[in-house]
Amino acid sequence: MQRHIMVVMTNPAEGQDQAYNDWYDNTHLKDVLEIPGIKAATRYRLSEHQRADPPHPYSYLAIYEIETDDLPRVVSELKTRAGSELMPISPALAPARQTLIFEPRTGVRK
């Protein structure tokens, strides 16, 4: 099986922080993890301690671990489900977001 990571950077809609986090933590992560090949998910909030001064475009990051020999099928399933009853998108999610999938280039180095 090939391993990939998908990184998703998002923000809550204006004034929707609580609804956004509730939806993401309690609904969206579960919906995404139902897709065959997506094995794990971790969410992060932007730390106040950064190397660069603000502004920073996104306040939240989700990292999904993907294991599959058919990445196009996983991507297709994500596209098909997004916004459907299988993966509803909350209005608490701001429309601007960035999703990128990466494949390994090296092994773990210490």
Image (spheres, rainbow, N blue to C red):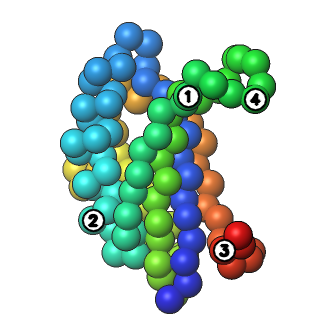
Residue under numbered circle 1: 47
The x and y percentages for residue 35 are: 33, 68
Q: What SS does tag 1 mark? A: loop
Q: What SS does tag 3 mark? A: loop
Q: Quadrant of residue 34?
A: bottom left
Residue under numbered circle 2: 34
- Identity, as a three-letter code, of the amino acid under mark 4: Arg
Residue under numbered circle 4: 51
Circles 4, 2 touching at the beta carbon (< 8 Å) = no
Residue under numbered circle 3: 108
Circles 2, 1 touching at the beta carbon (< 8 Å) = no
Q: What SS does tag 4 mark? A: loop
The x and y percentages for residue 101 are: 61, 61
Label 1 packing within 10 angstroms: few (<14), some (14-19), many (20+): few
Question: Image height check: is 52 above or below 68?
Answer: above
Label 4 packing within 10 angstroms: few (<14), some (14-19), many (20+): few
Earlier in the chain: of badge 3 and badge 2, it is 2
